Amino acid sequence: MFNAVIFGGTGFIGTFFARHLIEEYGYKKVYLFDRESISTKEFKFRKKMIENYPQIKTIVGDVKETIDWIPNESIDLIGNFAAVHREPGHEDYEYYECNLLGAENVCDWAGRVDCNKMIFSSSIAPYGPSEEVRDERSIPVPTTAYGGSKLAAEKIHQIWHAKKEQRQLIIVRPGVVFGPGEGGNVTRLIKAVCKRYFLYMANRNTRKAGVYVKELCRAMMWVLNSEKAKAEGISLFNMSMNPGPSIEEYVNSIARIAKIKVWIPNVPSTLLFIIAYSIDFIAKPLKIKHPFSPVRIRKLIRSNNILPNYLVENGYDYKYTLDEAFADWKKDCPDEWN
């Protein structure tokens, strides 16, 4: 029987991964280490999802500080999903402070509890935005503080791995992770499409590498348990559907699952930026946060065309198509589709 600790555990990916470890791999105990208890989270689905699992226990703590807590059980696996990730939304130094200090403290703690297996959730942000196809062989060129901090955090985990021969490290670079209780961009996209106020922003063919959260959980454990990963000791892979869907493909899939017909016009990028900079000009001096920032518009209209070639080349069998992912989401959490 195995035990695990998930840092950033009460977040979106952490709660799904905890359940996956218990249901699919029979883990005896899974600790969710986070700044917030699951009971204080605003997303009701996450609470409901794990409330019937006595194997799951929440530990309140901050990875930016030295981790003094030590569990009674030996720990077989660590998942490090703790991060400041919302972009825009934070000052540049906050990404580095949390993501680098967090990596240092988690790796130090792993050494102290003698755990030799770790999964680190990085991001596709180190690649930077590009219309060109990127895969694991591409050189990372981060253009944001978030992307830079994630790339640096990968190096910290690699240093941890190099200190002991028996250690195994999995680094996953996921695209947009979506699913029930995420409360993020894809949730907002579903609402906008279903309520018919969504507009294509400049280019409906913009590709956004994305993956269903349950597929991500499957893939992380598939790689961890593969003979190739065990032999190599360290594995880095991109996680996205193959290829990443275009905005139009996301929208059409949502419409099919919601069983609605939509006609969606296209707004020119020039108009979008005029509006965004105008709002920013007024909001910034007043320190008002708003969702229509130029940074967010730039992210929306530029592709992150990332391919999961490690998975494809090593024979990973995807469980969910885009339609199947959205259908499963709607079945699990129909309230988010109203």
Image (cartoon, rainbow, N blue to C red):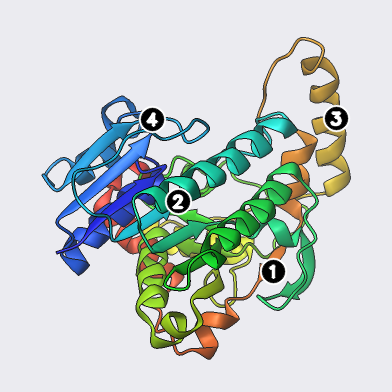
Q: Residue at x 37, y 64 (%)?
A: 217
Q: Using the image, tell me which numbered label, if any, was put on residue 61.
A: 4
Nearer to us: label 4 or label 3? 4
The percent coordinates of residue 148 (x first, y second) are 73, 50
Above-or-below relation of 81 to 59? below
Mark closest to the chain's N terminus, 4 or 3: 4
- What residue is shown with label 3? 277
Dot in front, 3 or 2: 2
Looking at the rendering, which quadrant does residue 330 occupy? bottom left
Circle 2 Cα neighbour tier, 10 Å, few/some/many (<14 / 14–19 / ≥20): many
Residue 71 drawn above or below residue 170? above
Whole-number angstrom distance, CA of label 4 to CA of label 1: 36 Å
Question: Distance of mark 4 from mark 3, alpha carbons?
Answer: 39 Å
Q: Amino acid at mark 2?
A: Asn
Nearer mark to the viewer, of 3 and 1? 1
Q: CA distance from mark 2 to mark 1?
A: 25 Å
Q: Tell which circle, 3 or 1, labels the residue nearer the N-terminal end.
A: 3
Whichever of labels 4 and 2 marks the residue nearer the N terminus, that label is 4
Badge 2 element: strand
Please state which amino acid type lies under the numbered disc 3.
Tyr
- Residue at point 54%, 59% (across, down): 160
Which of the labelled discs sits on residue 80, or is there none? 2
Q: Secondary structure at mark 3?
A: helix
Q: Identify the element where label 4 is drawn.
A: loop
What x and y, as percent, mark residue 83?
Answer: 53, 42
Q: Residues within 10 Å of mark 1 (few under 14, many from 20)?
A: many
Q: Earlier in the sequence, mark 3 or mark 2?
A: 2
Q: Which mark is residue 305?
A: 1
The kind of residue on which mark 1 rests is Asn
